[in-house]
Image (cartoon, rainbow, N blue to C red):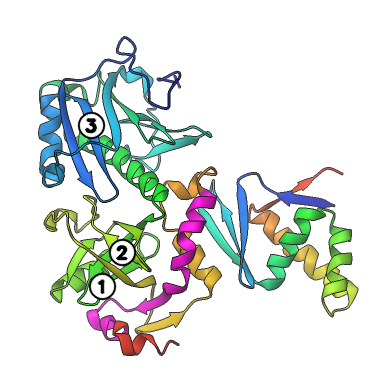
Amino acid sequence: MSVRLRRDVRFRVVGDEAIVIRQRAAEVLVLNEVGARILQLLEVEPNLDELVDSLAQEFEAERSQLQADAVAFVAELVEAGVLEEVSP
Amino acid sequence: MKRFVPRSSSGRVERESAVAPVWGTSDLTLGLPGGVFRCAGLSESQVEVLEPRFGAWRVGRQPDVHIEVRRAPQSSFDLRTVSGEVSTFERAFDADRVQLSGFDLLALIERESLDAVLLTPVDGALASSVGTPDPRFLDAFENLLRVLCAYRCLQQGGALLHSSGVLTERGVHLFIGPSGAGKTTVARLSQERGLGVLSDDINLVLPADGAGSFAQRLPFAGELGNGLPARPGDHGVVVGLHRLVQGPRHELRALSGGSGLAALLGSCPFVNSDPFALDRLIANLEPLQDLVTELSFRRDADFWQLLSPSRQEVLV
């Protein structure tokens, strides 16, 4: 599965966090450090398997746990209108 | 919906009187914080409608921004309403222009010069403004002017904040938050304590010479609006920016830079939904983000005890 930012969404890293602006909905979200990193990685590599590979190199956690948390977080962002799925 | 001004060749909106004639030959020049706006093409009765709200802001200076008011058939206007409010309007953006469309207005704004054409309907709701002043023309004009002020302020390194602004001896405290968070309540409670209120709806924030920012009054107000005297010069250095939340007791909490910036971005009407303006808006707001705190308050004026300089240094 691959995902990307929706066209009306912008994000900016501020300190350890990221702010995510959904312009069409006039909504602003704040992501913590890990959430910010996930968005940064997804900009470069939209594939979720490769995202998890990258996260595994940066964070101390079981891969299975990383995968479950990353997939759940991405699903949350899709639900929130921040990300959208793209065809491979 | 029909497009009403087809092109611009020189950065200024073309005057195509055959397409959309002006209402009259009167004009009004307003000196607002951030710039001088000249509105031409008004009928005498339209000037009468605008005078009570904007008369105190009239100046004789050269304009920075030109607005031309024209009339167009009712069929040109979007008759849909959003949430039953006829004043609501939609926006469309491209790299050169911003377009507003709603029940009472169509407007096209040149992004760089901010020169604008405002069209109001000749048949239907506002037809009477040719002879008899129609107060709804005021809404259409004010909506455009709010948007123009937001963009003008953006060009000057500042932002228009949906906020209550209260003037104290130390400077201005701005209270932000979504509708219902308590902005008007804060303004009312502050007014009852003898403090000056800039606006309970929209305040302009511009960078000050040297360091910091100052907040300035605009001729726009919310529920308290008509009770506030028009005092064009009211302004002060911004000493506090507070995101309002209601709670069982008064409490002031620090916010992270990201949360502060997010709160500010959510409080910048019009431009925060413009993809061509976002980078500049963020750059303008970043110097303010560390000023933002969260103020939990219970709808009485005791919250002011938390905003004294000594108390603000000890945040929850």
Indicate left or right for B157 with B262 as reference: left
The residue under label 2 is B214
Amino acid on which the number 1 mark rests in the picture: Gly
Chain letter for the residue marked with disc 2 in the picture: B
The residue under label 1 is B171
Q: Which residues are magenta?
A: B278-306
The disc placed on residue B39 is 3
Mark earlier in primary sequence (3, 1): 3
What residue lies at 12% left-to-right and 57% top-to-bottom?
Answer: B227
Contact (Cβ within 8 Å) of mark 1 with mark 2: yes
Tell me where residue B38 appears, x and y as whole percent. 23, 34
Amino acid on which the number 2 mark rests in the picture: Phe
What residue lies at 73% left-to-right and 65% top-to-bottom?
Answer: A73
Disc 1 element: loop
Chain letter for the residue marked with disc 1 in the picture: B
Graded by Cα atoms within 10 Å as few (under 14), some (14 to 19) or many (20 or more), the crowding at tag 2 reads some
